[in-house]
Image: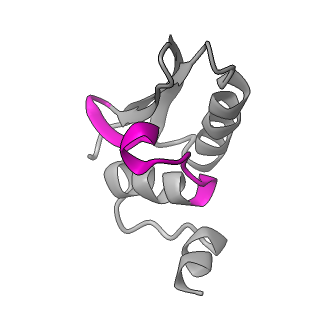
Amino acid sequence: MTDRAAVSITYCTQCRWLLRAAWLAQELLGTFEADLTGVTLVPGRGGVFEVRVGDELVFSRRAAGRFPEAAELKRLVRDRVAPGRDLGHVDRAKAD
C-alpha cells in the first residue's frame, strides 16, 4: 500500500477487551502516525478480536487461538502500510 491506510480493531464488549484494543491502537498510532489515517475501535460480541488494515483481515484471535503481541501486530501492519521499513528493536527482537 502506498496511500495512508485505515486500521480497525474489533473487540468483544462481553469479554471487556476494550482496554487491550485501545492499548494496541495506541501502539500502532505511535509507530505508524504518518502511515495511517487512524485506528478505529469497533465493538463486537462473541469473543471477537480482529485487526484489519483496510478490508484485509491481518489478525484474528479466533484463528490464532491467542491475542497478538504488540511487536507481532506492528510487523503485520508494517508489511501492508510501509513494506521494508525498519521497526528497530521490534525487528531485532524477532531475530533473537
The quarter in which the C terminus is drawn is bottom right
- Residue 14 vs 93, above or below: the answer is above
In the displayed structure image, the side of residue 45 where residue 17 appears, left or right? right
Q: What residue appears at the point 46 percent right and 47 percent down from the top-left corner?
A: 65
- Residue 36 vs 16, above or below: the answer is below
Viewer-proximal residue among 43 and 62: 62
Q: Is residue 50 magenta?
A: no
Q: Is residue 63 magenta?
A: yes
In the displayed structure image, the side of residue 21 where residue 59 appears, left or right? left
Q: How is the image coloured?
A: one colour
Viewer-proximal residue among 53 and 84: 53
Q: Position of residue 93 (x, y in %)?
A: 62, 77
Viewer-proximal residue among 38 and 92: 92
Q: How many marks?
A: 0
Q: Position of residue 49 (x, y in %)?
A: 49, 31
- Residue 30, image quadrant: top right
Q: What residue appears at the point 52 percent right and 42 percent down from the top-left corner?
A: 34
Give the magenta range: 54-71
Q: What residue appears at the point 47 percent right and 36 percent down from the top-left corner?
A: 36
Q: Residue furthest bottom?
A: 96
Q: What residue appears at the point 54 percent right and 77 percent down from the top-left corner?
A: 94
Q: Position of residue 42 (x, y in %)?
A: 50, 15
Q: Position of residue 63 (x, y in %)?
A: 36, 44
In the displayed structure image, the side of residue 57 where residue 73 appears, left or right? right
- Residue 66 vs 3, above or below: the answer is below
